[in-house]
Image (tube, rainbow, N blue to C red):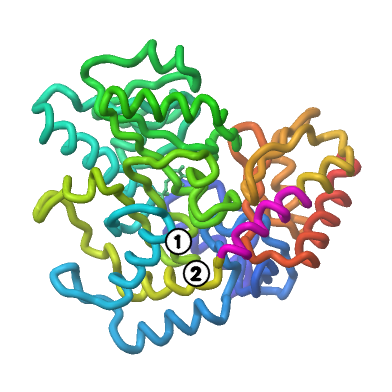
């Protein structure tokens, strides 16, 4: 099938909810991908932060094939070894008590919201169901997680939205303005991803954690994008010096297979008992085997290298002094680049992709989320494409 045939087929039968770029990615190795005609691309996108150990890592493909040949799925009414082993590794490395497995980031955040409301209901009864989130946040595409998202552009069409959310500016004054006796939790990203890659201020996060403890609000961290080594520690909260009550994860956890969920601290480990929550595919043995391979590859050294690689990419971009790009920001390999001049971030992204560098946008910025295993040669090749493509823009 040539590209035009593929595009026509897709246009006809797949719902048009995405603006796709005209590239048919066919296969790849680590951060180097190829289209059906064999043209190569350097991947600074990881499928939106998902391919944390790159494309087709041999340990990942072997783990999946081995598990698929034994058992592809059973159900959560039975025990499977990959699920239990993964739970232990994740809890131990995160400093958490237990875990719930689902399939996506939005589902992980839905779980956090349910956890907080049940925690509060068990202790205080009804009337304390409000979750505070931050302006410019993003928490997912289900109705509840859209409602939790603190950006008005997401609050359209699908009325009525569920209530129970209020949005604070990321300052202590901003939080006081929307606080109240009906609040049970705060839910936030530590680096706001979709809205433009904005790391939260350490002092603010620390003060808010103290306030949460005082008011018995659960401190819920959405690590769907920041988690699994992306920012230079397994979870981003580990470098903010806080211990959340519960944390969601998804994107990078299984290296490309669908998996999401949330971790709970000791205080919250027994809040959700039998019958209160579930997921048909959650903890699927093939996805769990893939996630075990990911966490095996992402040892402490590989994860901390993300900090150096991120610094290298940001320094290189700064030294190019390209007229269409401004300052860079972010943590580890979660990088936002300001766009200036008359071309939009979407136009710049399209040009870069056409020239062989896969990138993302976020809010008004360009966003780079390369695989954590990206090599020096791949970074240099990507940066060379970036400089060549944007020099004249
Ligand atoms: C991507 C993302 C989500 C939604 O994840 P899905 O797997 O698409 O449901 C939620 N929160 C954050 C911070 C994200 O980056």
Q: Which residues are magenta?
A: 300-312
In what quadrant of the picture does the N terminus appear? bottom right
Circle 2: is it few (<14), some (14-19), or many (20+) Cα within 10 Å?
A: many
Q: Residue under circle 1?
A: 253
Spot occupied by residue 173 in the image (x, y as percentages of width and height) = 45, 12
The residue depicted at 64 percent of the width and 61 percent of the height is 23
Label at residue 294: 2
Q: Report x, y in % for residue 270.
A: 17, 49
Q: Secondary structure at mark 2?
A: helix
Q: How many marks?
A: 2
Label 2 C-beta lies within 8 Å of the nearest ligand 1 atom = no
Q: Is residue 302 magenta?
A: yes
100 or 338: nearer the eye? 100
Circle 1: element type: loop
Tell me if label 1 and label 2 are in contact, CB under 8 Å.
Answer: yes
Q: Residue 254's image quarter?
A: bottom left
**Nearer to us in this view, 69 or 92:** 92
Residue 328 locus on image (x, y percent): 73, 37
Asked whether 309 falls inside the magenta stretch, the response is yes
Prevailing secondary structure class for the magenta stretch in the rendered image: helix
Q: Which mark is residue 83?
A: none
- Horizontally, residue 1 falls left or right of residue 283, namely right
Question: Is residue 314 positioned above or below 213 on the image?
Answer: below
Q: Residue at x 82, y 62 (%)?
A: 381
Name the image quarter holding the C terminus: top right
Is residue 304 visible to us here? yes
């Amino acid at each position: 099938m040539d590209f035009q045939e593929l595009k026509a087929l897709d246009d006809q039968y797949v719902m048009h909810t995405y603006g796709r770029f005209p590239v048919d990615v066919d296969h790849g190795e680590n951060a180097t991908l190829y289209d059906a005609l064999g043209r190569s691309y350097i991947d600074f996108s990881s499928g939106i932060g998902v391919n944390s150990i790159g494309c087709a890592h041999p340990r990942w493909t072997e783990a999946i094939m081995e598990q698929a040949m034994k058992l592809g799925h059973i159900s959560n009414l039975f025990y499977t070894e990959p699920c239990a082993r993964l739970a232990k590794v994740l809890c131990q490395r995160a400093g958490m008590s237990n875990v719930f497995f689902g399939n996506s980031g939005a589902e992980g955040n839905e779980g956090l919201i349910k956890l907080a409301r049940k925690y509060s209901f068990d202790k205080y009864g009804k009337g304390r169901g409000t979750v505070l989130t931050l302006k410019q946040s993003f928490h997912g595409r289900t109705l509840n997680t859209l409602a939790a998202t603190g950006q008005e552009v997401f609050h359209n069409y699908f009325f009525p939205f569920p209530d129970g959310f209020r949005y604070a500016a990321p300052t202590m004054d901003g939080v006081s303005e929307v606080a109240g006796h009906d609040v049970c939790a705060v839910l936030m990203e530590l680096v706001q991803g979709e809205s433009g890659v904005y790391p939260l201020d350490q002092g603010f996060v620390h003060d808010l954690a103290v306030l949460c403890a005082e008011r018995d609000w659960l401190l819920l961290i959405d690590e769907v994008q920041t988690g699994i080594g992306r920012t230079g520690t397994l979870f981003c909260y580990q470098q903010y010096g806080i211990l959340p009550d519960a944390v969601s994860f998804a994107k990078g956890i299984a290296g490309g297979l669908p998996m999401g969920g949330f971790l709970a601290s000791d205080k919250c480990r027994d809040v959700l008992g039998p019958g209160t929550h579930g997921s048909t595919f959650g903890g699927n043995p093939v996805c769990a085997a893939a996630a075990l391979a990911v966490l095996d590859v992402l040892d402490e050294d590989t994860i901390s290298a993300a900090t150096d690689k991120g610094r290298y990419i940001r320094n290189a971009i700064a030294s190019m002094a390209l007229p269409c790009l401004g300052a860079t920001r972010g943590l580890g390999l979660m990088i936002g680049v300001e766009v200036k001049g008359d071309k939009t971030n979407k136009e710049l992204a399209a040009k870069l992709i056409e020239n062989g560098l896969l990138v993302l946008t976020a809010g008004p910025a360009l966003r780079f989320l390369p695989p954590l295993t990206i090599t020096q040669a791949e970074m240099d090749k990507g940066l060379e494409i970036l400089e060549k493509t944007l020099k004249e823009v």
